[in-house]
Image (spheres, helix red, strand yellow):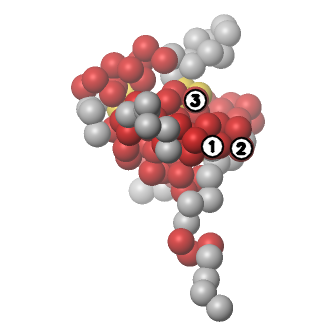
Amino acid sequence: MNEHEEIEAGGIDAETVARLKSEHGNELVLALGPHGPLVFKKPSAPVWARFQNDSNDDKSTPNGVLKQLAMSCLVYPCDEDTRRPDQAALATAFTDKPGLPAVIAAALSELAGVDKNLVKKL
């Protein structure tokens, strides 16, 4: 299956992917949500810092922190006019698939540079 067929299998067309890449950069993650595709951009440095800080906060729940990271990086689906991400679609996906935040957070962590292959012992 080539990249184009993969995108089509995910329910998102190549034109939309091209637009999202031009708006948000080439590092995107596609998640197959229960009601359609979800696309996330790489976490910015401030978003990643907030995620790390919230992860260590005793008042935060682990699942809540994962959901917040995903919500901060969601770029699709979005309103065609305002380009604002559809947070309700993501919340519905999380309700239907409660493990989805963990999978998305893991993929976003890789985009942010959490990769043990980037560091080697000397």
- Labelled disc at residue 45: 2
**Residue 56, x across and y down, in percent:** 50, 44
Residue 82 vs 70, above or below: the answer is: above
Is residue 118 placed above or below 6 in the rendered structure? Answer: below
Q: Secondary structure at mark 3?
A: helix
- Residue drawn 65% across and 43% down? 49
Element type at marker 2? helix
User: What amino acid type should be assigned to the residue bearing mark 1?
Assistant: Trp
Q: Where, by quadrant of the figure, is residue 120 drawn?
A: bottom right
Give residue 78's mark.
Answer: none
Query: Spatial distance from mark 2 to mark 3, Cα to Cα?
Result: 12 Å
Q: Residues within 10 Å of mark 3 (few under 14, many from 20)?
A: some
Which residue does the numbered mark 3 point to in the structure image?
72
Q: Earlier in the sequence, mark 2 or mark 3?
A: 2
Give the mark nearer the N terminus: 1 vs 3: 1
Q: Position of residue 114 (x, y in %)?
A: 56, 60
| Visible residue check, residue 95 | yes
Identity of the amino acid at label 3?
Ser
| Residue type pointed to by label 2 | Ala
Question: Which residue shows up at 62% across the image and 43% down it?
Answer: 48
Q: Nearer the viewer, residue 66 or 2?
A: 66
Q: Is residue 36 left or right of residue 47?
A: left
Q: Are dots 2 and 1 in contact, CB under 8 Å?
A: yes
Q: Quadrant of residue 52?
A: top right
**Measured from the top left, where is residue 108 in percent x and y?**
53, 47
For the N terminus, the image quarter is: bottom left
In the rendered view, tell whether residue 119 sits above or below residue 32.
below
Residue 27 appears left or right of 58 = right
> Residue at the location (26% across, 32% down)?
97
Q: Which residue is labeled 1 in the image?
A: 48
Q: Residue at x 44, y 37 (%)?
A: 58
Name the one closer to the observer, 3 or 29: 29
